[in-house]
Image (cartoon, grey):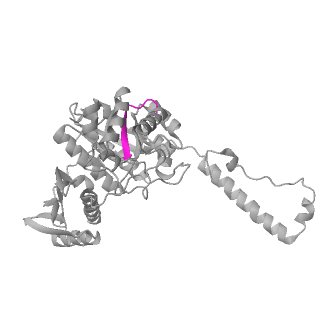
Amino acid sequence: MDQNNPEQNELPEIPEKTPGFRAYLSKPVAIAALTVALAASICLIIALMVSDSPDKNASLQVAETEAVAASPAPLYEEPMEDDIDDKVKLIDLSLINTLKAAKISMSDLRLEDVSLKKHQGHDYHFQQLSFPVSGDKKKFIANVQKALESTALNASMHEVAADSWIISINGVPTHKFSILTPKVKAQKPAPVKLDPNAPKIAIIIDDMGEDLRLAKGLAALDAKITFSIWPNSSHAKKTIAIARNSGNEIMIHLPMEPKGYPKINPGKDALLINMDAESIREKTLVAIAKVPGATGLNNHMGSRFTEFYTGMKVVMNQLNKRHLFFLDSRTTPKSAGRKAAAKAGVTFYERNIFLDNVKDVGAIKYQLSKTAKIARKRGQAIAIGHPNHETLKAIRQWVAENRGKIRVVPVSSLRPKI
């Protein structure tokens, strides 16, 4: 049922004045059928009345439970072969689930450090964690080992010091965690201190333009999320209006060819490496025209096209003429985005973290904590998420828990990547 179409919400009228209706009612089977139909109609009326009841939080609650999409759910990101950081996120989730099962609060989980490392040309984040365990430590470690085995990632764990372990994937160290002695919590929580010099993060939500209720939920957050909008999305104009009215930055999310093309389809009007310069120029300009008010552009998929320096130069020349920045989503470590942007004089940014490859609220909040840790080390960081309800819920919770400690800002207010 399309809730935006009032005609579909109307109940059919019973044709009491139709000739032969009384004769129809004289038949026992017909009476039984009509009774069932009337009962169903009454139930539908009650359901509609309940669904229309006022609720001051309705817009946010609906945003987490319903979607208004005119087309089937799109493929948000191309699968990345042998991407170790995706495997790291699965280990993150297994650790989070083990902590939850041990009734260890996520507020007690401390992300001590995050370091960017490389393995076979792929970036990944080595993390150092600590948390208290009040119960049987041996049992907890056994549960961690069991959870790692369930990931089927060839993950191993070994103790490197007292109460300190290293987790590796295929022999590559990815996590170090330490078990702390539980502390007695203070009776009153410490007051929130607003830090005017708190580090900045930008949170971009890609693939916007299909789910209006989720767009409204993101716009209602106590943080300025950047909307990256598909030019050909079903509700691009309405999504642009929602972002403008709420003061959220707008970007263009331009489809580009992935390495799995054509099996993996980036969508209509994507930039392809077999296109000539004029075709690339025209498609780029059409995309820009469909998202008025945008301050920049980032790639949707594009692991193959962003490595295509000649094509990327054409894109950058158009961005330069219209004073738009380019944010590289970094779907390949061999992207030519930075080189092409520098050649064309385009302001360049680069994604640090993907938030929701694992669609779990706890895992997404943990990815946000990684982003914040990177920002504290470098002064700023950029995270990219996608329009799903777990991401909306995670951002809402994380922003509330970290108020005053971090600033969520538009991408354009960050220092460009040099």
Picture coordinates of residue 142, whole percent (x, y): 20, 73
On screen, 168 above or below 13? below
On screen, 44 above or below 245? below
Picture coordinates of residue 338, whole percent (x, y): 25, 39
Question: Which residue is more in the foreground, 369 or 342?
Answer: 342
Looking at the rendering, which quadrant does residue 167 occupy? bottom left
Question: Which residue is more in the foreground, 53 or 163?
Answer: 163
In the image, is residue 296 part of the stretch drawn in magenta? yes
Picture coordinates of residue 57, whole percent (x, y): 48, 43
Residue 212 appears in the figure: yes
In the image, is residue 326 part of the stretch drawn in magenta? no
Residue name at image x 88 percent, y 69 percent: 27
Question: Which residue is more in the foreground, 318 or 387?
Answer: 318
Q: Is residue 220 left or right of residue 153?
A: right
Residue name at image x 10 percent, y 64 percent: 163
Q: Magenta segment range?
A: 291-300
Location of the C terminus by quadrant is top left
